[in-house]
Amino acid sequence: MRTKTMRLAFCGVIAALSVVVLFLTGIVPVATIALPAVAGCLLIAVVAETNVRYGFAVYLVSSLFSALLTPDREAALLYIIFFGYYPVLYGLLTRIRSRALCWAAKLSVFNAAMVLEAVLAVLFLQIPVEEMLPFGWVSIPVMLLLLNAVFVLYDLSLNGLIVLYIRRLHPVVGKYLK
């Protein structure tokens, strides 16, 4: 019983920390993209210490509270659409044996999320399309190419963070949760 209670408490703390990090976008408005990515990286600990189901549960709870409490709606949308669940999904996607298929799946998830984010930002957040396309419609393929390059760097960094967590923090945190 103690282990399940400790794991639930740990998940609650991580969900609260994610919401606090997202709330900081109201204080540091230039971090609209960086802080949702940091908040999502907190879920690495949940997946490492518990399992993927707990990770998705923390994502759902933190997404709900971030939608209600985060002052920067675009940051909350980025977290909900991509950065919140991708660290949890990462472990499932890396189980694909073929490297080419693995990267194809990762890039497909990312591109679908970015297109959905752009559409939702225009429809619900009332962001003018002209702001998203500074050089007209030619901007779309250029932006997608740049976004994909940044995503590859993010994915490689996420892998490094996971390895770092497993080597350094997992033995310490796992001792308290087991």
Image (tube, grey):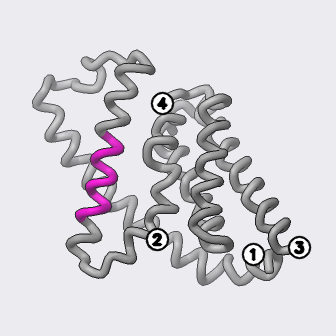
- Which of the 4 image quarters holds residue 120? top left
Location of mark 4 (residue): 74
| Tag 3: amino acid | Arg
| Tag 4: amino acid | Glu
Magenta part of the chain: 104-114
The residue located at (78%, 61%) in the rendering is 8
Location of mark 2 (residue): 91
Could you say where residue 83 lies in the image, as x and y percent from the top left?
48, 49
The residue located at (20%, 73%) in the rendering is 100
The residue located at (16%, 32%) in the rendering is 139
Nearer to us: label 4 or label 3: 3
Location of mark 1 (residue): 173
107 magenta-colored:
yes
Q: Earlier in the sequence, mark 2 or mark 3?
A: 3
| Tag 1: amino acid | Val
Q: How many marks?
A: 4
